[in-house]
Image: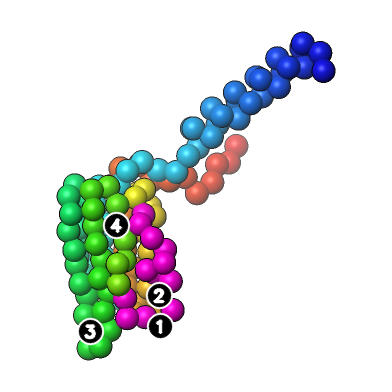
């Protein structure tokens, strides 16, 4: 490769890096909203530690908020996908427990881009 090829390659890599930084997911969320069957049942600020437990008979979902993130710590659902999802921290992200009809959505800050069109 010639010297100019290396310069072109470096410029393309720098452009790709800049686009990656500009189009990365949204900023840090400010609060987590917990919904059951589409109705908001709790709001947890992400400025400190907090916990919310939703119960209905034998069903339950325990949501833990820490500074900057939230996760479903325990659930009575049979597959436990919501627990294995882990912590989320960016605005627009969510965790859903379908068997219990509970969802946790992060709001505030910058929302992540779904798509970019020109």
Q: Are marks 1 and 2 in contact (CB under 8 Å)?
A: yes
Q: Report crowding for label 2: few under 14, some 14 to 19, many 20 or more residues within 10 A (C-alpha).
A: some
Instruction: Evaluate whether residue 39 shows in this view.
Output: no
| The C terminus sits in image quarter | top right
Residue of label 4: 70
Image location (x, y in percent) of residue 113 = 47, 45
Give the number of the disc on residue 78. Answer: 1
Task: Provide residue 69's location: percent of width, then percent of height.
Answer: 29, 52
Does residue 48 appear in the picture of this structure?
yes
- Residue marked by disc 2: 80
Dot 3 or dot 2, earlier in sequence: 3
Q: Which residue is at 25% across, 71% downward?
A: 62
Image quadrant assignment for residue 96 = bottom left
> Residue 77 in magenta?
yes
Q: Which circle's residue, 4 or 3, is located before the other in the chain?
A: 3
**Would residue 110 be counted in the magenta stretch?**
no
Q: CA distance from mark 4 to mark 1?
A: 21 Å
The residue lying furthest to the top in this view is 3
Q: In the figure, 9 relative to 21: above or below?
A: above
Does label 2 or label 4 sit earlier along the sequence?
4
Residue 55, image x, y percentages = 21, 80
């Amino acid at each position: 490769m010639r010297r100019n090829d290396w310069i072109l390659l470096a410029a393309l890599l720098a452009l790709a890096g800049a686009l990656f930084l500009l189009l990365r997911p949204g900023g840090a969320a400010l609060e987590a909203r917990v919904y059951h069957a589409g109705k908001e049942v709790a709001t947890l600020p992400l400025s400190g530690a907090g916990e919310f437990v939703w119960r209905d008979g034998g069903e339950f979902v325990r949501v833990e908020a820490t500074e900057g993130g939230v996760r479903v710590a325990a659930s009575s659902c049979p597959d436990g996908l919501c627990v294995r999802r882990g912590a989320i921290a960016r605005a627009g992200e969510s965790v859903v427990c379908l068997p219990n009809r509970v969802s946790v959505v992060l709001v505030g800050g910058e929302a992540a881009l779904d798509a970019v069109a020109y």
